[in-house]
Structure formats: C-alpha cells, structure tokens
Image: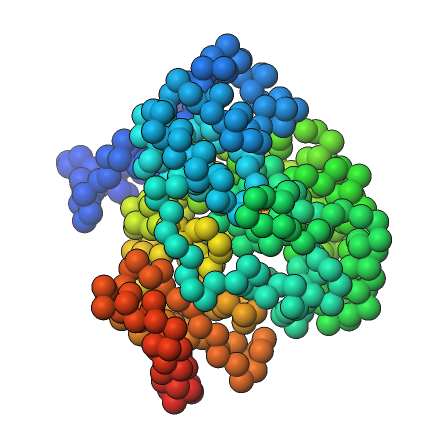
Amino acid sequence: MANETVSASASSSLLNVVGQGPSPIVHLKPRVDESTLTHRHLKDGPFWQQIPAWKDIDEATFLSHLWQEKNAITTPEKLVAAVRDLASDDFIKDVEAGFAVAPMAVRISPYLLGLIDWSSPYQDPIRRQFLPVKSQLEPDHPWLTLDSLHEQGDAPVPGLTHRYPDKALFLALDTCPVYCRFCTRSYAVGTDTDAVEKVSLKATDERWEQALQYISERPEIEDVVVSGGDAYRLRADQIRVIGERLIAMKHIRRFRFATKGIAVQPMKVLTDTAWTDAVTHVVDKARKVHKEVVIHTHFNHPNEITSISQRAGNLLMERGITVRNQCVFQRGVNDDAETMITLVKKLGFINVHPYYVYIHDLVRGTEDLRTSVAAGIQVEKRVRGTTAGFNTPMFVVDAPGGGGKRDMHSHEHYNRETGISVYTAPSVKKDQYFCYFDPISSLSPAIQKDWADEKKRAQMMDAAVDQARSSTI
Ligand SMILES: *Cc1c(COP(=O)(O)O)cnc(C)c1O
Ligand code: SF4
C-alpha cells in the first residue's frame, strides 16, 4: 500500500509540473473520424441472398467451395436465369449481345455475382470486369494482336515462357475459377468462343515434364511463376508435385502460385482443406530449405474484399503464407484515385501486399476497359504517400511485343496527343523499342481521324520511335 502511494506520486511529479494536471497534447493534424476510414469497412452478412435463386442459401452452404463450383455461372443462359428479376430486359439483351462477340469464355463465381450492385449494373465495377455489354464496347485498337505480350514467341516449350534472365513463367493449365473479360491470355485461357479458337495448354503429364525439365536444365533460373489459367484449379496432389519438383531443383530459390481465386472465391481457402494444406505443405517444406514460396493474387476493386476475404487472409497469415496482389488498371473500375487508394489500403488491412498495377494490356474486346498511361501517372501520384512504401504498388506497362514489365514512368518518349509511349528494356531485349498505345477514345477527334488512316498511323509511330531513339540515354 505505502509503496504504491510513493511510486504513484513519484511518477506524477516526474511527468507533470507540480500543481498542474497533465498538459494537453497538441494535435498538429486534425483527428480522423474513424467512420471515414472506409478501407476498414468489410461487407458482412448474407449479401448473396439478393440473388433470387440463393435467397435461402445459408452461410455454411455459401462458404463451401463445392457449392461455389457447382453454382458457377458458365453460360449466358445461366446468367439470365439468375438475374432476370434483378436487371432490366434491356440490360439482359445488352449482355447477351456482348457475350456473342466476346473473345473470353463465360465463368463467374456466385461470390462475385452476389457482390454486384444489381440496382446499377451498368456502372458496377465487378460487372464491368466480367460481363461484357454490347452498348459499351469500343472497336479494338488497330494494332492489337491476340498474344500482345508475345508469350508464345518467348516460349521454348509450350506454356513455359522464359523472357527474363532469372525467372520463368509456367502456365500449368488453362482453366480458371472465373473468366475475366480483360484476360491477357485470352489466346489460351478458357474454352473456345465464337470469336476465338484457343491454343491448348492442358495440364498434361507430358507438357509438365517438358516444362520442368527445361527449368531444371537452366541454372540461371532462380524464380518460377506457376500460373495458367489459375493455381486454384490445380488439385492438391498437383500442387504438391509441382512444389516438390521445384524445391528439389538446386538453383530454384523462390516460386509463386498465381491465383485469382483469393479474390473471386476466397472461401476455398477456408473450406477446401486439401488444397490449402497442400499449399501450406509446399511453403513449409520450401522454408525449411530456405526457399520462398508465396501466393500472387489479383484483386481489382475494393468491393471484392469482404469479411470472407479477411478470414481467408487471416488463415493464410496464420500459416505463414505471404500473399501479394497484381491489379489491372481499368477504366470505370479503378481508374480514379479514391478507388485505388481504398483498394491499396484495404489490401493492406487484410495482409495482402499490393505489388503491381498493370496498365491494361492490348486485349481483344476490351478497348472500353483500357486507360491512357497519363491516367495511370495521375493516379499513381495520389496513391504514393498514403501508406507504407512496401504496400505501395508499382504501376507498370507490360510492353507489347515482349519487353516485359516496365515502370510506367520510364518511357523514353510519350506523346500524349497521339497516345504513343515508347519503352526500352535493356536487360530483356537489348536495342529494341516497344510501343504502348492509349485507347483511341481518349484522344482528340483530329488525332482519332489520323489513327483511322493506315499511312498516318504508321507515320505517328515512326515519329515516336525516332523521338525515343534520339532521347534514349
Ligand atoms: C510477370 C512475368 C514474370 C514475373 O515477373 P515479376 O516482375 O518478378 O513479377 C516472369 N515471366 C514472365 C513472362 C512474366 O510476364
Ligand atoms: S483469372 Fe487470370 S488467367 Fe484466368 S481469365 Fe482471369 S486474368 Fe485470365
């Protein structure tokens, strides 16, 4: 008792001027009202019950990965059946017409369908990414090719792209839990559509053997991206096979499983125990021999992050599995600073590291989703400084023609009027120039007319490359 009294008065006399209370702290910045920190607001409750067919589906059923697979929307007919009462006839007709010309197959998870705001489907950022509507489509850019990143040209073995000196991209399979309109790999991913016949990249023993053998014969490769398609669709035994083979290769120091699944079907992490345990097994086994195995995922909009995503993130964190995010910058989805800042902060909140934001590749049927490099520069400027540097994504252009990812700001030349930016990639393809083209609709009417003229557009491009050549340091 006596001791307590003594120590209490001793400490108060140390901290305060005798006879005065604690001096108030002067807040130099006004305190932020917690309710405005929207990145901490995670959607909770049975949001999927807004879909009439799922109004009686309880949480346990909705969280089952098997239920999610079984109820995936895989045809325009199934979509119409699910949302007929939620959307106008005009909208439904617009989507049907959009699908008829789409280069991507249809597949959307119940999780995503339930997150769309069906009171304004035209504006909804999730709808925009997965369900094409004919009335919003824009003609493809005249210089678009189906494999704009030249992945097949840089592939010594089908589905194994070796572009960068020390890393390789292994496309293990060609299916995904969802099919995104904007997929860069629409040349291979998903089933054939009316518009495109796909290159086959099936998960066959023979192709995998060739790919793994190639990696084993290249001592300079230290890093492998296991992608597709999507690692969510690899069976647990396949995850183990690939993982153990790569761990056993002396020169491999790290690899990643790339999956959009964490973003579009997070409940699988919670309920497909075999899959999650297989990934954990590979990560743990690699760690014991001092190799790093992580997951790369693909969130594009804050609405995709819910309390289910957080539970998945928590479980992966408890298992010691790092998750990084690669995002695609898309018009009407995340091309405004507020949305991008919220996304970045929300990812940080659920322990996912924002890694890259890609300027939208030149992909068929997606001109309405592309933005200019200038728009990326604007948004990046606002994002940087809002949170930890290691949680601040790098904005990149994946240079058409196979130059690889370039810091968006590192162009040798950028003509904002013609929308042509020119990049070099000295460590990837020496002495080459790579051009990226802003969407035609972002240009002035006069320049749009020049783009329609074959001769004039060739001149614009030659001029841009000449400029780049003379200014390259
Ligand atoms: C993106 C990519 C990689 C991995 O690149 P990081 O910058 O390390 O994420 C590897 N190979 C190819 C072909 C790629 O496109
Ligand atoms: S999940 Fe990835 S690979 Fe699959 S369709 Fe979407 S962007 Fe393409």
Total marks in image: 0
Q: 322 or 22: nearer the eye?
A: 322
- The colour scheme is rainbow
Q: Residue at x 35, y 57 (%)?
A: 371
Instruction: Looking at this view, name the residue that lies furthest to the top.
Output: 56
Figure quadrant of the C terminus: bottom left
Q: Residue at x 82, y 68 (%)?
A: 217
Figure quadrant of the N terminus: top left
Q: Residue at x 40, y 29 (%)?
A: 92
Q: Is residue 239 left or right of residue 16?
A: right
User: In this rendering, is residue 36 above or below 443?
Assistant: above
Instruction: Looking at this view, name the residue that lies furthest to the bottom.
Output: 470
- How far from the left and from the top, in percent, is residue 367? 40, 54
User: In this rendering, is residue 142 above or below 11?
Assistant: below
- How far from the left and from the top, in percent, is residue 279? 70, 41
User: In this rendering, is residue 13 above or below 5?
Assistant: below
Q: Residue at x 47, y 25 (%)?
A: 80
- How far from the left and from the top, in percent, is residue 470? 38, 89
Q: Is residue 290 left or right of residue 351?
A: right
Residue 383's quadrant in the figure?
A: bottom left
Q: Is residue 84 left or right of residue 5?
A: right
Q: Is residue 305 left or right of residue 413?
A: right
Q: 195 or 358: nearer the eye?
A: 195
Is residue 452 among what the camera can see? yes
Is residue 47 among what the camera can see? no
- How far from the left and from the top, in percent, is residue 285? 77, 47
